[in-house]
């Protein structure tokens, strides 16, 4: 131990001292870092650290300051260290290697965006809640493939988010604000005027004609955030339900064919499809207030089944399946302050 320390103190390398004394460098290093190490060894190691010669290729403070200043200059504020290195090298100037530039910039917390980035106005998250039909309508437009490549029809679809009832559907050869206004006027005349109409930010949704109509009727307009499809889940889910249905054609032979299909599919969906998001009721039953009657009939049927086959139920007070429960509210981006049972608004 003492011999090893003496050799280290005399300037011998650790590898040579270990070979001459037969001791392991790892062992001696571990002992030097513990309180039981000898004072001589600790002093020798500490002296070696103090006497360590600074590398001859180390940049001085002026050079390091230049490495930080040049990439942050107006000329290179939009360039990466690699681009700065290549540009300066081509001009006959050498600051340091690319890795050194990255390391010095990292030490100064400069390995990040150094540009003056534009800031965009944050868009408010739409938070809509409906506790009954005819409160919140959402609408969107989807493309239907026509008879030839590049030919598409536009299906305008409006949905009541509480009942999932399709309150209006129009199919046209093109998309425009006046056609969207025409659909809304027809829907409002038949179904009543809602409190809120929600849509994404398509050209028809933000066109002048639609906001003017909603303003005249004192209807609050709501829009999804840019590029956030989750802000319009009811329309997106319904389009998927339709397009993944076995009866959905690959292409429509004509505009009349598309209109006939949409009318028949909406009729089935509204009056025959038992929706998992509304207690397995049909959208029409919920929209027109028949759900309580249907729920009572279901309850009587389950009660009779318990009496007839009690072994198939856990007890006389066995509750009805949870999937048959009607949610208290439907929402788009459920407000955090609302203490409601989370549900899937787009479950079909």
Image: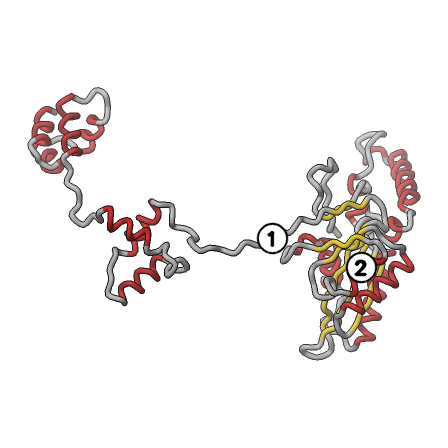
Looking at the rendered structure, the number of numbered marks drawn on it comes to: 2
Would you identify the image quadrant in which residue 75 lies?
bottom left
Q: How is the image coloured?
A: secondary structure
- Quarter-of-image position of residue 197: bottom right
Using a 10 Å C-alpha cutoff, classify the residue at mark 2 as few (fewer than 14 neighbours), some (14 to 19) or many (20 or more).
many
Helix, strand or loop at label 1? It is loop
**Quadrant location of residue 327?**
top right
Q: What element carries label 2?
A: strand
| Of residues 109 and 342, the one drawn nearer to the viewer in this rendering | 109
Residue with the most extreme front position: 74
On screen, 6 above or below 53?
Answer: above
Q: Quadrant of the N terminus?
A: top left
Taking the spot 81% from the left edge, 57% from the top edge, the residue there is 215
Which residue, as the protein is rendered here, is positioned at the far top? 36
> What distance separates the C-alpha of mark 2 from that of mark 1?
29 Å
| Residue under numbered circle 2 | 158
* Percent position of residue 175, x then y: 75, 70
First in sequence: mark 2 vs mark 1: 1
The numbered mark at residue 121 is: 1
Q: Residue at x 80, y 75 (%)?
A: 255
Q: Which residue lies furthest to the bottom in this view?
A: 148
In this image, 58 relative to 126: left or right? left
**Residue 326 x %, y %:** 82, 42
């Amino acid at each position: 131990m003492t011999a090893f320390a003496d050799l280290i103190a005399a300037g011998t390398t650790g590898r040579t001292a270990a070979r001459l004394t037969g001791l392991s460098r790892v062992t001696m290093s571990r002992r030097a870092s513990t309180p039981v190490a000898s004072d001589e060894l600790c002093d020798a190691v500490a002296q070696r650290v103090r006497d360590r010669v600074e590398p001859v290729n180390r940049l001085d403070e002026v050079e390091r300051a230049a490495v930080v200043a040049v990439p942050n200059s107006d000329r290179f504020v939009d360039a990466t260290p690699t681009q700065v290195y290549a540009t300066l090298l081509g001009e006959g100037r050498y600051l340091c290697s690319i890795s050194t530039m990255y390391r010095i910039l990292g030490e100064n917390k400069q390995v990040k965006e150094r540009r003056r980035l534009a800031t965009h106005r944050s868009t408010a998250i739409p938070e809509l809640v409906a506790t009954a039909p005819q409160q919140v309508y959402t609408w969107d437009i989807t493309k239907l493939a026509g008879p030839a490549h590049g030919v598409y029809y536009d299906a305008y679809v409006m949905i009541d988010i509480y009942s999932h009832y399709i309150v209006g559907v129009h199919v046209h050869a093109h998309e425009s604000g006046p056609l969207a206004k025409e659909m809304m006027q027809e829907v409002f005349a038949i179904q009543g005027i809602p409190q809120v109409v929600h849509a994404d930010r398509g050209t028809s949704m933000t066109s002048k004609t639609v906001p003017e109509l909603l303003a005249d009727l004192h209807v609050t307009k709501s829009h999804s955030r840019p590029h956030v499809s989750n802000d319009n889940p009811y329309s997106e889910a319904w389009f998927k339900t339709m397009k993944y249905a076995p009866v959905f054609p690959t292409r429509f032979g004509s505009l009349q064919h598309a209109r006939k299909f949409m009318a028949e599919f909406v009729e089935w969906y509204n009056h025959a499809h038992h929706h998992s998001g509304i207690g397995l009721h049909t959208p029409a039953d919920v929209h027109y207030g028949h759900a309580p009657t249907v729920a009572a009939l279901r309850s009587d049927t389950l009660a009779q089944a318990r009496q007839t086959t009690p072994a198939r139920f856990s007890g006389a007070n066995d509750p009805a399946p949870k999937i048959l429960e009607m949610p208290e509210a439907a929402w788009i981006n459920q407000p955090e302050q609302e203490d409601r049972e989370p549900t899937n608004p787009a479950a079909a």
